[in-house]
């Protein structure tokens, strides 16, 4: 099994270096390093020729920030046997014995399991872009977009058994899954074994040669935040946070089965593809508390705590199709609704190296309760397509490094 992400960390590091967007990262707009939260302006000892900062920071203005981040998220897949080694004789010619149709030939040990794409969890890179405006009363409004790259988990089974333990009849080089209820368009290769009739091992999923399963996970967020300071001293400030938030989580499971005839030939019409996709699209509002402590020497600490409530519009889609995409396809979609709470905690450290520039590093943890997933993703009944869906808690955690600029 191998795990990969689509975007490289290096590309996203370039995005972060561009420093284009920051909610809650607004202390760089204040004159903290020149004297706590005072609204007066004290110019830096060394004036640098760049268009950042302001001689009147109390008036407010535009700020932007970009974040490079690394996150992992809950993988909902659990153990489910997908395929075993061996095949089913579908007529009497395989064993050349009357009444032998339906006999399973081979060791019947587990060859492929959904649990093989259940982890281990992987860290994937991402970014956050933010832009906002600070008003003269110290409040601010910020729009942000948060995104992490696709995580991918793969597993496969082939005709080669573990430790090259081939049976004398080669039966353990075949893979079988108990899919049923499919039409003759999914009959598979006509002659998979040398003995017996043309379809004596009938069906794409009976006596297959290769099976691969993949799980893709994606997530992104957009929000608008209003921040209002309500208490501050020389070295401490507390602000209330509120705004709308949208969050999307996608789990997409795919299982691909490839059939070969006895000469090793294949065709797209001998390939079966199963998809099970779950999209949690959450629409809601959040509220939070932001606390900031000025430490000294240009450093500060911040702690953000947030709670949110969402209406989760869950869309599911499951289908069987042939590899050529031209044959029959059985597909079923459902829409479900859930009330989903979210809890978030984000501690961080900030540094003000230059006038109008802020660098922030932190750890972000958040969780959703009552989202929907399909832990055992495969329904082997082609005709009904009703895999089990379960309410689960999902956890995200990751590291963030942000560069903010104030104009």
Image: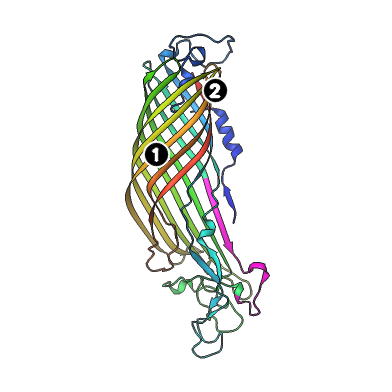
Using residue 74 as the reference point, say whether residue 156 is left or right of it: right
Is residue 149 a member of the stretch shown in magenta? no
Residue at the disc numbered 2: 351
Q: Residue furthest bottom?
A: 98
Q: Residue at x 38, y 39 (%)?
A: 246
Identify the residue shown where x is 60% and y is 66%.
158
Mark 1 Cα within 10 Å, few/some/many (few <14, many 20+)? some
Q: Is residue 125 visible?
A: yes
Q: Which mark is residue 185?
A: none
293 over 79 or under it: above or below: above
SS for dot 1: strand
x and y, in percent, of residue 163 in the image: 67, 68
Q: Position of residue 288 (x, y in %)?
A: 37, 31
Q: On the rendered structure, is 130 left or right of 6?
A: left
Up the image or down, 246 lies above or below 89; here it is above
Q: Is residue 152 magenta?
A: yes
Quadrant housing residue 304: top left
- Is residue 100 positioned above or below 28 on the image? below
Task: Give the magenta part as a residue range.
Answer: 150-171
| Mark positioned earlier in the residue sequence (1 or 2) | 1
Q: Residues within 10 Å of mark 2 (few under 14, many from 20)?
A: many
Element at label 2: strand
Question: Is residue 20 in sight in this rendering?
Answer: no
Residue at the spot of label 1: 343
Rendered location of residue 259, percent (x, y): 56, 70
Given residues 85 and 36, the one toward you in this image is: 36
Instruction: Tell me if label 1 and label 2 are in contact, CB under 8 Å.
Output: no
Residue located 56% across and 86% down the image: 95
Residue 29 in the image, given as x and y percentages of width and height? 46, 18
Distance from Cα at disc 1 to Cα at disc 2: 27 Å
Residue visible at 48% across and 63% down in the picture:
80
Quadrant in which the N terminus appears: bottom right
């Amino acid at each position: 099994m191998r795990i990969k992400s689509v975007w490289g960390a290096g590309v996203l590091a370039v995005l972060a270096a561009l420093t284009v967007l920051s909610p809650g990262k607004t202390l760089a707009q204040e004159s903290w390093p020149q004297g706590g939260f005072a609204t007066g302006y004290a110019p830096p000892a060394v004036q640098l020729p760049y268009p950042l900062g302001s001689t009147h920071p109390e008036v407010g203005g535009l700020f932007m920030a970009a974040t490079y981040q690394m996150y992992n998220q809950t993988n909902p897949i659990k153990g489910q046997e997908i395929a075993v080694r061996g095949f089913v004789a579908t007529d009497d010619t395989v064993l050349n014995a009357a009444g032998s149709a339906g006999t399973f030939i081979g060791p019947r040990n587990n060859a492929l399991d959904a649990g093989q794409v259940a982890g281990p969890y992987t860290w994937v890179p991402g970014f956050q872009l933010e832009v906002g405006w600070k008003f003269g009363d110290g409040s601010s409004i910020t729009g942000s977009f948060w995104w992490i790259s696709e995580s991918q988990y793969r597993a496969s089974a082939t005709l080669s058994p573990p430790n090259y333990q081939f049976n004398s009849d080669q039966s353990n080089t075949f893979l079988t899954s108990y899919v049923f209820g499919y039409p003759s368009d999914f009959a598979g290769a006509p002659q998979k074994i040398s003995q017996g009739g043309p379809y004596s091992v009938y069906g794409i999923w009976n006596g297959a040669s290769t099976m691969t399963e993949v799980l893709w996970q994606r997530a992104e967020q957009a929000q608008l935040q209003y921040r209002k300071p309500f208490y501050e001293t020389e070295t401490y400030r507390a602000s209330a946070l509120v705004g709308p938030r949208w969050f999307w989580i996608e789990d997409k499971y795919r299982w691909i089965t490839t059939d070969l005839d006895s000469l090793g030939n294949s065709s797209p019409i001998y390939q079966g593809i199963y998809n099970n996709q779950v999209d949690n699209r959450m629409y809601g509002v959040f509220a939070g508390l932001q606390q900031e402590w000025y430490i000294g020497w240009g450093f500060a600490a911040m702690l953000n705590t947030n709670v949110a409530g969402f209406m989760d519009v869950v869309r599911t889609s499951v289908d069987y199709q042939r590899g050529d995409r031209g044959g029959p396809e059985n597909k079923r979609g459902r829409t479900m609704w859930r009330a989903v709470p979210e809890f978030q905690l984000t501690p961080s450290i900030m540094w003000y190296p230059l006038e109008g520039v802020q660098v922030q590093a932190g750890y972000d943890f958040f969780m959703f309760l009552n989202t929907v997933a399909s832990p055992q993703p495969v329904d082997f009944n082609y005709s009904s397509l009703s895999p089990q869906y379960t309410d689960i808690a999902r956890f995200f955690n990751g590291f963030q490094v942000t560069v903010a600029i104030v104009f």
